Amino acid sequence: MTNVDTRPLNADEATATYDVMIVGAGFAGMYLLHKLRGLGFTARVFDAAGGVGGTWYWNRYPGARCDVMSIDYSFSFDPELEQEWQWSEKYATQPEILRYANHVADRYDLWPDMQFETRIEAAHWNEGLGRWLVTTSAGDLVSTGHVVMAVGTLSAPKLPEIPGIESYQGATYQTQKWPHEGVDFTGKRVAVIGTGSSAIQSIPLIAAQATHTTVFQRTPNYSMPAGNRPLDPAEVATLKANYRDYRQRAKESFFGVPIEGEPKLCFEATEEERQATYQAGWDSGNLVGLIGGFADILFNKEANDTAAEFIRQQIRSIVDDPETAEALCPKDYPVGTKRPCLDTNYYQTFNKPNVRLVNLRQTPITEITPKGIKVGDEEIEVDAIVYATGFDAMTGSFTRVDIQGVGGVKLAEEWTNGPRTYLGVAMTGFPNFWAVTGPQSPSVLSNMMVSIEQHVDWITDCLVHLRDKGYTTIEAEASAQEAWVEHSNELGNQTLYPLANSWYMGANVPGKPRVFLPYIGGCGPYRERCNEVAAKGYEGFKLA
């Protein structure tokens, strides 16, 4: 889907020229800018937001917090940075992560080369120039040698497909576009539609304010207690003394987070050992701790069932009302195949007398009315609706821009049946066009900071290689792209992920092709493959 005039852009009208144009001022865009400047490239960052931080700029809903531990969710490229910055909690909140992002921008003086409140509207490849011409909402026409889409994986929010949304006369909010000044729900009747990560984090805090909270749930989620706490200074000091080794183990790990030892297969353990492993994972407040407790949890349905049932038993033990507890228990998809969540008193919130769960599997929403939400024959009147309904994940930030490659081919049309990339970083027909943590890379199945650094380092190494060898263009070969797509799909189909209607599969967007979007081969093996490609003179790419 394109949203702008698609007439050819005129290079003579260019208002600025750069070696590299970076789309997105999140952690990927900031590190990329810092790295490129150090290598002698001219570069500029453009972002629709009013500041740095990417998803942490926009997602300011109550309880917004990272689900990767703060000591892991941070840059490793500068030992001085990781030593000077002090995280306060095990899982950093959105305000603290945003402070970190601003600290990074200040520390490396990135501000002069970043342009905010500017959306990229079109990017057209000019074959005569061998350059990209890019238009922005601010009226820029940029001529650039390379375009890097550092747009993030969860940055194209969507509303649910419910009749009558526009008719509602009360206040409405989206967790992905939360007012920066915050919202006070005191004395309000609030509806929350959705039970994904943002809902699970925000519902306990909304319910603590509101007179009454009604949660509308279509698909229950697996969630575990985060066990959040202040960080112990002695614990931090020990880690910082060994940060280099810890970071290297993270790079070589499967999820970008080090784990101790090699997990064995589920049924190699006794029932007592399994329960102890799951309990330790639950108590640790670590997603990898439970789902990664055994090597085959995401590959063997019978093994997965044992982990899923453990979590369901925890839910039943927490929620007082048996009917509500069962409604909150996921039963029709394996644990881990939708983004699992970490929470603070999520299930306990449903024990409050002023909190109601509406099971949309039993009584679907028929329409939004001027006064509230209608389910079956009942109209539930509310003062505010919170839409916690997710994103057009991983591909939406690409397909919503008018991107045209060689011969005017449109990326959105090329991806009609699902994304097609080589290594998740490049696309056939789109020379000098890059993605950071894009589809068919480890991306959302990893600690994003580890994947961001790996992609930025690899792309910038490639740009230096091109410059040193006198090349001006690089493009993924069709055969290499097809082989990578086939490989990525093959690995995905060996897992349990296709059994769930998740945003990993594009299933939350009507009409979106049902394709497993990330790469499940693991951070370490993926890194090795990328390094092999580079070592072989960028095998699978055409350099000219």
Image (cartoon, grey):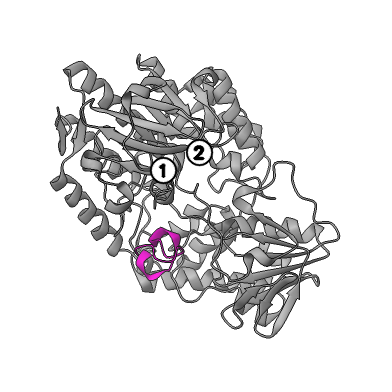
Identified by mark 1, the residue type is Gly
The answer to whether residue 276 is left or right of residue 35 is: right
Identity of the residue drawn at 39% across and 27% down:
21
| Of 4 and 202, the residue lying toward us | 4
Q: Give the range drawn in magenta.
A: 497-513
**Residue 70 percent across, percent down from the top left:** 57, 39
Q: Would residue 19 be seen by someone viewing this image from the given angle?
A: no
**Residue 19 percent across, percent down from the top left:** 33, 21
Q: Earlier in the sequence, mark 1 or mark 2?
A: 2
The answer to whether residue 100 is left or right of residue 371 is: left
Identity of the residue drawn at 38% across and 70% down:
499
**Residue 249 percent across, percent down from the top left:** 39, 37
Name the main secondary structure of what is drawn in magenta.
loop
Number of the label disc, if any, that sits on residue 463? none
**Above or below: residue 186 compared with residue 474:** below
Secondary structure of the residue carrying tag 1 is: loop
| Of 246 and 529, the residue lying toward us | 529
Separation of residues labelled 1 and 2 (CA atoms): 9 Å
Number of the label disc, if any, that sits on residue 256? 1
Q: In which quarter of the image is the C terminus?
A: top left
> Residue 530, located in which quarter of the rendered image?
top left
The residue that mark 2 highlights is 72
- On whether residue 504 falls in the magenta region, the answer is yes
Secondary structure of the residue carrying tag 2 is: loop
Identity of the residue drawn at 79% across and 58% down:
208
* Circles 1 and 2 in contact, beta carbons < 8 Å: yes
Number of other residues with Cα within 10 Å of mark 1, as a class: few under 14, some 14 to 19, many 20 or more: many
| Of 531 and 213, the residue lying toward us | 213
**Residue 416 percent across, percent down from the top left:** 31, 57
| Of 291 and 379, the residue lying toward us | 379
> Residue 379, located in which quarter of the rendered image?
bottom right
